[in-house]
Image (spheres, rainbow, N blue to C red):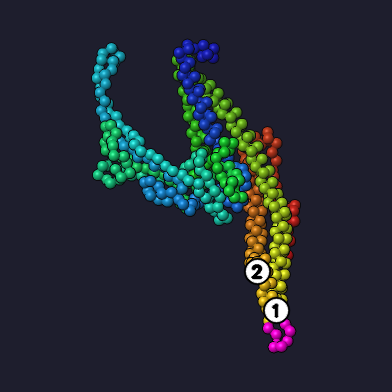
């Protein structure tokens, strides 16, 4: 029977060829959805103050000092995309030849929507959270905005011509549909993308990068995005399995039992699915392990920053403090010398003292030690915040890493990668002692 299946006529093999190709396509889409879901789940959310160079995931609100104004809704936003579609309908009469060779006539009704205008605009904007802001450059990103305008109207509505073209499409019903999607100002957003150093100031920005696995700007939450990729994983697999079974059934069902052809095609698809899933999970676990190591190095970088920066800042502030103290003492001494003495008694020359005071003012026109102390205080607080964020980031991704090693079926693939649990970081785990500022 198996021999007869693979010796079918060539004209019966095209269904399995088409079904097999479509099944492989759907399998590839399913694996891509699974890979992206794991990436969203594996990458912890960092704060704007703790953004590092590399692939990051952040959450906050969209902010801009000079926002756009959307075309249809007229709301302030950082991104918008609109479309104006016009409805048409017509009756088509056609002739055809039936199975007996007779020519016949039939009519059918056709209708649909045709886009008559569309457009949009985007600008760089800031994502703001509780710790600060980071610049987002949306060019090249997959943007998932929210619907802010959706109206269908006829020619009697002022909107029909106010926001739509003055001409009409062929066979128009004179109904137009106006839709607009946007990222309004202050809207909560989710961003995953490659962080890099800005060119204008010393600060990070998130922009498109060909080497990055994903650049996503979405108004959905992280859970909604992960759930969407999960449904895509199951949906593409079901479609692939159905096409593989359907193609084999059409190809071999005429000469062999359809059930056997369906079982064989389904088994082949599931085998490919198992191999592809193992490959995706293995790469995901290795990527997760590397990100845990990177998170550990981020803590070390922040500790080294504190170790190198704070003593230098203290030295600069101390120098300013000593210099200002000398200036204050000199001013006090000159002020005492410039006071008038008793009549007839020798004393200082006020004009000469005034010249020295003017020279001193030119040398040090403004006293700034108090500002330096405030800047030092802010830098100390910012440094400790960076260390705390880096430590929290490491603990979060390490916890997720350790959980992946325990859940089934990931734990079996983790053994292939030789992965072991990573310890969490506590406050007394720091290798570099804190810098004492007195």
Residue 215: image quadrant is top right
- Is 54 left, or right, of 223 in this rendering? right
Could you tell me if residue 56 is visible in this image? Answer: no
Mark number for residue 349? 1
The answer to which of 202 and 254 lies nearer the viewer is 202
Would you place residue 219 above or below residue 172 in this image? below
Of circles 1 and 2, which is in front? 1
- What distance separates the C-alpha of mark 1 from that of mark 2? 19 Å
Q: Which residue sits at x=72%, y=54%? A: 308
Mark number for residue 401? none
Question: Where residue 125 sits: x, y (%)?
Answer: 50, 48
Q: Which residue sits at x=38%, y=46%? A: 71
The answer to which of 99 and 67 lies nearer the viewer is 67
Quadrant location of the C terminus in the rendered image: bottom right
- Is 340 left, or right, of 78 in this rendering? right
Question: Where residue 138 sits: x, y (%)?
Answer: 51, 43
Would you place residue 169 above or below residue 70 in this image? above
Q: Which residues are magenta?
A: 340-347
Q: Which residue sits at x=55%, y=36%? A: 34
Q: Which residue sits at x=59%, y=46%? A: 199
Task: Tell me the SS state at disc 1.
Answer: loop
Mark 2, residues whose alpha carbon is within 10 Å: few (<14), some, or many (≥20)? Answer: few
Question: Where residue 292 sits: x, y (%)?
Answer: 66, 43
Mark number for residue 361? 2
Question: Where residue 108 sits: x, y (%)?
Answer: 27, 26
| 332 part of magenta stretch | no
Task: Tell me the SS state at disc 2.
Answer: helix
């Amino acid at each position: 029977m198996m021999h007869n299946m693979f010796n079918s006529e060539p004209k019966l093999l095209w269904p399995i060829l088409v079904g097999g190709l479509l099944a492989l396509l759907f399998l590839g889409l399913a694996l891509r959805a699974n890979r992206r879901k794991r990436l969203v789940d594996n990458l912890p959310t960092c704060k704007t103050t703790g953004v590092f160079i590399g692939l990051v995931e952040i959450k906050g609100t969209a902010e801009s000092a000079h926002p756009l104004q959307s075309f249809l809704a007229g709301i302030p936003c950082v991104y918008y995309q609109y479309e104006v579609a016009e409805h048409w309908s017509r009756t088509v009469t056609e002739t055809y030849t039936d199975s007996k060779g007779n020519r016949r006539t039939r009519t059918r009704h056709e209708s649909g929507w045709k886009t008559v205008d569309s457009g949009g605009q985007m600008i760089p904007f800031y994502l703001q959270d509780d710790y600060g802001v980071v610049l987002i450059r949306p060019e090249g990103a997959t943007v998932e905005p929210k619907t802010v305008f959706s109206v269908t109207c006829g020619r009697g509505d002022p909107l029909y011509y106010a926001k739509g073209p003055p001409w009409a499409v062929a066979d128009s019903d004179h109904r137009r549909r106006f839709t607009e999607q946007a990222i309004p100002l202050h809207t909560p957003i989710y961003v995953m993308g490659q962080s890099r150093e800005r060119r204008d100031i010393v600060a990070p920005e998130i922009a498109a990068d060909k080497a990055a696995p994903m650049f996503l700007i979405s108004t959905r939450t992280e859970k909604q995005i992960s759930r969407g990729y999960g449904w895509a994983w199951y949906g593409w697999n079901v479609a692939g399995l159905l096409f593989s079974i359907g193609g084999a059934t059409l190809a071999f069902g005429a000469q062999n039992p359809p059930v056997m052809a369906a079982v064989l095609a389904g088994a082949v698809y599931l085998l490919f699915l198992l191999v592809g899933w193992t490959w995706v999970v293995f790469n995901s676990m290795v990527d997760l392990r590397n990100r845990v190591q990177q998170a550990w190095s981020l803590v070390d970088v922040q500790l080294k920053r504190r170790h190198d920066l704070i003593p230098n800042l203290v030295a600069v502030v101390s120098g300013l403090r000593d210099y200002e103290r000398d200036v204050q003492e000199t001013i006090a001494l000159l002020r005492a010398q410039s006071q008038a003495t008793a009549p007839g008694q020798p004393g200082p020359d006020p004009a000469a003292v005034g010249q020295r005071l003017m020279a001193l003012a030119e040398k040090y026109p403004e006293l700034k030690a108090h500002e330096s102390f405030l800047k030092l205080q802010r830098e100390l607080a910012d440094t400790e915040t960076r260390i705390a964020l880096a430590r929290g980031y490491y603990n979060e991704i390490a916890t997720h890493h350790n959980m992946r090693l325990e859940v089934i079926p990931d734990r079996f693939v983790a053994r292939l990668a030789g992965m072991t649990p990573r310890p969490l970081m506590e406050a007394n785990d720091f290798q570099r002692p804190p810098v004492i500022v007195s």
